[in-house]
């Protein structure tokens, strides 16, 4: 009897340890509901999307999306901790658990879906080109063949140009910075001829510096912005998708676009369809 009781005690202990060890596999939906806290990765140098203000607060369309989704998951704004996520570290941040989700002009791609899960999309845009306001030599993507271009490390945009023009062009003509905000001084000071990434990001920069830059306005890709979470969290993905659909239907999507993008908000006439998988 004592031996049997000992086995039962050990079994109970093992079960308890296993339960504790599996706590890290809980869905983001469970964490939000139980803890009322989330860590969200955002850009902090992209006007209109994710920008850290002088007072330390954050603003932009992605920030509004993150706040709305968090609220729908049960987390008040006071329970959100924003963490800077650069293009190159978004997947590692999610995989390492440094953030619970990433809302940072994050294009859904098949390659990225091998490492993390995506909810959304909550907006569709395309890769475009930003140049100095007085530059008439660049009219479309083909014009970049003999030009110096700046992009962000870890972004899919520079890779698209490198694939198009080849390795030699990449080594001679492509400059990559930690973020697109770091590309602006290079463009302004004639160290590069253009910045190329999503039209939405470029429009934000153009709006911030009226008269200095212009958007070419000829997108040459389709970029679907999604919310990144850890791999195989289907429950979390479904919960976030439901929140995004409500964001569309109750008018918050339109309101947030107009508030953050101003005149550029009109280019987005209708929200996309959420892709559940």
Image (cartoon, helix red, strand yellow):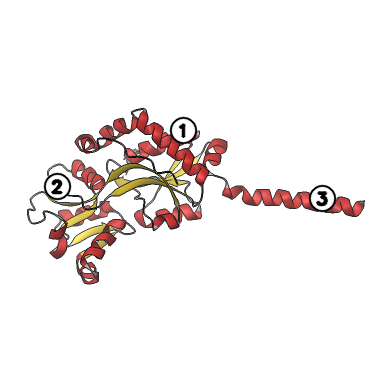
Q: Report the front residue among 94 and 236.
A: 236
Q: In the rendering, at what x and y percent does residue 121 appear?
A: 36, 43
Q: Nearer the viewer, residue 274 or 250?
A: 274
Q: Are marks 3 and 1 in contact (CB under 8 Å)?
A: no
**Neighbours of disc 1 within 10 Å: few (<14), some (14-19), many (20+):** many
Quadrant assignment, res 141: bottom left
Q: Position of residue 249 (x, y in %)?
A: 36, 30
**Above or below, comparing residue 35 to residue 96 in the picture:** above
Mark 3 lies on a secondary structure that is helix
Q: Distance between the Cα atoms at labels 2 and 3?
A: 71 Å
**Which residue is located at x 33 percent, y 33 percent?**
253
The picture places residue 74, in percent across and down from the top left corner, at: 50, 33
Q: Is residue 204 above or below residue 258?
A: below
Pinpoint residue 30: horizontal percent, then vertical percent. Answer: 56, 40
245 relative position to 126: left or right: right
Where residue 214 is drawn, which disc sits there? 2
Can the viewer see residue 75? no
Identify the mark nearer the N-term, 1 or 2.
Answer: 1
Q: CA distance from mark 3 to mark 1?
A: 41 Å
Q: Which residue is mark 3?
A: 9
Residue drawn at (17%, 62%), measured in percent from left and top? Answer: 148
Q: What residue is at 29 percent from the left and 44 percent from the top? A: 124
Q: Residues within 10 Å of mark 2 (few under 14, many from 20)?
A: many
| Secondary element at tag 2 | strand
Real-space Cα separation, disc 1 to disc 2, in angstroms: 37 Å
Which mark sits nearer the N-terminus, 2 or 3?
A: 3
Disc 3 crowd rating (10 Å Cα; few below 14, some 14-19, many 20+) is few
Mark 1 lies on residue: 72
Query: Can residue 217 be seen?
Result: yes
């Amino acid at each position: 009897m004592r031996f049997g009781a000992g086995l039962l005690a050990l079994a109970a202990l093992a079960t308890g340890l296993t339960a504790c060890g599996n706590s890290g596999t809980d869905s983001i939906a469970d964490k939000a509901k139980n803890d009322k806290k989330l860590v969200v990765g955002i850009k902090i140098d992209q006007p209109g999307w994710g920008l850290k203000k002088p007072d330390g607060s954050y603003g932009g369309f992605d920030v509004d999306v993150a706040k709305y989704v968090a609220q729908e998951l049960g987390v008040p704004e006071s329970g959100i901790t924003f963490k800077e996520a650069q293009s190159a570290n978004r997947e590692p941040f999610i995989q390492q658990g440094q953030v619970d989700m990433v809302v940072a002009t994050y294009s859904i791609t098949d390659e990225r879906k091998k490492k993390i899960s995506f909810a959304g999309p909550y907006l569709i845009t395309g890769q475009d080109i930003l140049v100095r306001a007085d530059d008439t030599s660049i009219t479309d993507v083909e014009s970049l063949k003999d030009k110096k271009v700046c992009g962000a490390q870890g972004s899919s945009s520079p890779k698209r140009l490198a694939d198009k023009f080849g390795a030699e062009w990449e080594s001679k003509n492509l400059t990559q910075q930690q973020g697109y905000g770091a590309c602006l001084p290079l463009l302004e000071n004639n160290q590069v001829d253009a910045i190329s990434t999503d039209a939405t990001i470029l429009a934000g920069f153009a709006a911030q510096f009226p008269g200095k830059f212009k958007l070419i306005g000829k997108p040459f890709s389709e970029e679907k912005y999604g919310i990144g979470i850890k791999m195989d969290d289907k429950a979390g993905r479904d919960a976030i998708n439901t929140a995004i659909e409500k964001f569309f239907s109750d008018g918050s999507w339109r309101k947030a676009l107009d508030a953050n993008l101003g005149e550029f908000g009109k280019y987005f006439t209708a929200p996309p369809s959420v892709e559940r998988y």
